[in-house]
Amino acid sequence: MISGATRAVVLLGAQRFDPTLAEAVAELGVEGKIAAITAGWQEREEEDDDLQEHLGGRTVNLRLHARAEEVFKNDPDLHAAHRERQAILRHRQDFYRIRLEHALDAQHVIANRAAPKDILHDEARASIQEIRDIDRSHLERCVRDHKAFEERWRPLERPAIVDQIGEIAELVKDCDAIAIAGGHVASLLNRLRLFDVAKLTAGKVVFAWCGGAMAVSERVVLFHHSPPQGPGAAEVLDEGLALVGDVVCLPQPEFRLRLDDRERIQVMARRFAPATCLALPARSRVTWLKRGPKNPSGVLALRDDGMHTRFEVSGAAGLGS
Amino acid sequence: MKRPMKPSSASMRAAPKSAIQQLIDSRPDAAKVDRFLEGRAIPIVEGPAVTFVWRGEANGVSLRHWIFGLESGSALARIPNTDLWYLTLDIPHGSRVEYKFEVHRSDRSEWIEDPRNPNRARDPFGANSVLQGEGYAVPDWVRPDPTSRSGLLEPFGFHSKAFGGMRSGHIYLPARFRKTRLYPLVVVHDGRDYLNFAVMKTVLDNLIERLEIPDMIVAFTDSPDRIREYPNDEQHARFLTEELLPDLTHRLPIIDRPQARCLMGASFGAVAAFSTAYRYPGVWGRLLLQSGSFAFTDIGKTNRRGPLFDKVVEFVNQVRANPVPVSERIFMSCGVYESLIYENRSLVPLLDATGMQVKFVESRDGHNWENWRDRLREGLSWLFPGPLMFIYE
C-alpha cells in the first residue's frame, strides 16, 4: 500500500554506477520537472551533476541539508534542542542495541540446541517474539521522543522553518515527481522530517533508492551482515515517512546481506513480518501504486524459511513472496 | 585371481613428501641446492608444515622466535654434503611469526634476519623476519590507498604541571576536518611507535574512508620514561585526565562525553590506559588494550617477571580483588603466542562481570607491533562503529 495522496512510489536499487532511474521515470510517464532530494549526501548535497545529466537536466535540487544548516543558524534555540534530541536518540539506539544483541544471541543458542521438534519450534517462535518486542518498544520510545520534541519546540510553526517549507513547497509545486537519493539515512530522514516532506508528495510520483527507499518506508532498518567489528545485528533506527507500507527496504544486498546464511535470513524475515523484507540490488526496481506493487524487476524477497526468491506480484495488488 | 590392492582413498595414500624431504632424498649437491632455492618463497609453507632454511658455512644455526610455549633456539639441521640448513615446524593456520636466525661460528654467534625472506617487521629495536603462515595475509587496509583521503598529523607541545615539564606528541585530524563538527577523541600511548611500526595514520585514513570508523581526532602521546610512568602512575593519569583532556577539549571540537573518549595502548601502554581509567572512573568511556602486561599473583607479591612488574602486579591484584566498572566498552586483544595470553584471558571474565562491555580477540601472533596493527580495525570499529551502518548509496 502507499500513503494517501502520493501517486506512485518507485523503489530502486543503487544508482551510483549503473543508473536505471531515467527508465523508471519514462515508464511512469513523468515528463515535467523532478524535485531532487540529495540531503543524504550531507555536505556533498549539491554535487548532483550526474543525477542532473542522467535525468536530462530537469531536476531541481531542494537543498534540504543546506536549508537545515540555515535553520539551525537562524534559530539557535531550535538547534540546541535538536542536538539534545539527537543525543537522546543516540542513547536510545545504544541501549536498544545492547538488549537486542543479547536477544539475538539467545535466539542463536536456542536455534542450535537439540530438543524435540515441537519444543524447538515453540521456543524459536518465542525467541523471535522477544526480538520483535525489543524492536517495538525501541520504536515506541523513538516516537515518544519525537513527539515530546515536537510538542515542546513546535518546529513546524517556527519562522525559520516555515519560511524554508514555503520555498520548498513552491519548488515542488512545479514538479511532477520527487527523486530521493540515498546516503546517510539518519541524516536524510531527519531533514525529510524537519521540512515535513511527506506532505509535499501529494499528487507526485516518488522515486527513491538506497537510503531514500529506506526513508520512505514505514520502518528504517539498519543492516550489514559483515561489518568490520564482527557479526552485525540488523537494528531498527526509527519510523520512516511511511509512503510505502508493509515492506522493509534492504538496499545493496550484494555486499550487505549474506543471502546464503539461512538462519540470519530467516530471523530477518520473521522478525519484521508481516512486512516483507525486500532486497534491492543494483538495477532492481518495483513500483507501488494505490492498488499495490507492480512490475517488480530484480527485487528479492526474504522468506521465513531462510531462503530468498524473486519478488513477484500475484494478481493486481498482492505482496507475493 | 586376486587383484593387487591399490590405495583407494586419500587416507590410504602416503602423505606427499615435503619439498625439503624431496631435496634430501635426492642426495643434493650445490647445484641442486641452487636450483631448489631459485625462485622459491622462503620460508617454505606447505599447509601447516613450515620449513625455515638458511644457507652458508657455520658451526650451527638456530631459529630464534618469540612464540611462547615453543622452544626458541631450536637447531636447524644441515643437509649432508651441502651448506643448506633447515628446520620444519608445524605452524597453525593463520599464524604470523617473527623470527631471526642465530648463526654460530667458531669465534662468535650472531642474530641475523633471514636473507631469503623479504617480509620484515620493524620495531623500536630494529627488524625481524616474518613468517606468514598458511591463511595469514597482510590486511589491505594497512597499506596506503591512493583513494583514501589523507588526514593531517600536527605536532603538539604541552607543559604538564603533573610532570613539571614539556610533553609532546602528534595530533591526527581527519581529512575532512571541520571546526563546526564534533569528533570523538582517542589518546594513544607510545604514539610514535604506533605511527611508525603499526602505520596507524594509514590505518586511520583507510578505515575512515571506508566508513568503518567515524572521523576522529587522535592524540599520539609519548613518554620519556614509559617504564616508570606507564605502570599505574598517579602523575601520568593526572596528566592525561586533568591536563591533556581538558586542553584538547578546549582547543578542538571534541565530543564532551565519556562515550566519545578512548584511551589505548599496548603492553605497558595498555596498563597505563587501563590504570588511568581506573583512577578516573566514568571519564574514559572506551578503552583499547592490546597485549596488556596485566601480570598478577594469586598468592604473595613475588612475580616471575621481575621488579619492573611490581607496580603492575600491585595494580592488577587490586583490580582483581575489587573489579569495578570504570569504562563502558573495552576492546582487548592478545596474541596466543605471547606469555601474556594467560593474564589477558584471566582478566576478561572479571571485567565482563562488572557490567562493562568487553570484547576480547586472540590472534596467532606474538607481542609485536604488527600484531597490534592487525587488530586495529576490529578494535577501533567495535569501540567507534563508523557510519557504514547508516550510509546506503
Image: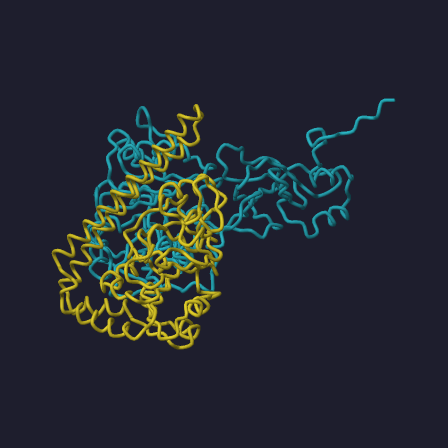
In the rendering, at what x and y percent does residue A249 appear? 38, 53
Q: Which residue is drawn at 71% across and 36% down?
A: B16
Q: Which picture quadrant has residue A233?
A: top left
Q: Which residue is drawn at 48% across and 53% down?
A: A254
Above-or-below relation of B151 to B365: below
Left or right: where B238 falls relative to B123: left
Colour that chain A carries in the picture: yellow
Above-or-below relation of A189 to B20: below
**A172 or B88: nearer the viewer:** A172
| Residue sticking out furthest to the top | B1
Chain ID, cyan in image? B
In the rendering, at what x and y percent does residue B385 appear? 34, 50
Q: Can residue B193 be seen in this view?
A: no
Q: Residue at x 41, y 26 (%)?
A: A118
**A70 or B169: nearer the viewer:** A70
| Residue sticking out furthest to the front | A315
**B359 or A157: nearer the viewer:** A157
Above-or-below relation of B77 to A50: above
Left or right: where A61 falls relative to A149: right
| Residue sticking out furthest to the left | A152
In the rendering, at what x and y percent does residue A245 appear? 33, 53
Q: Is residue A123 visible?
A: yes
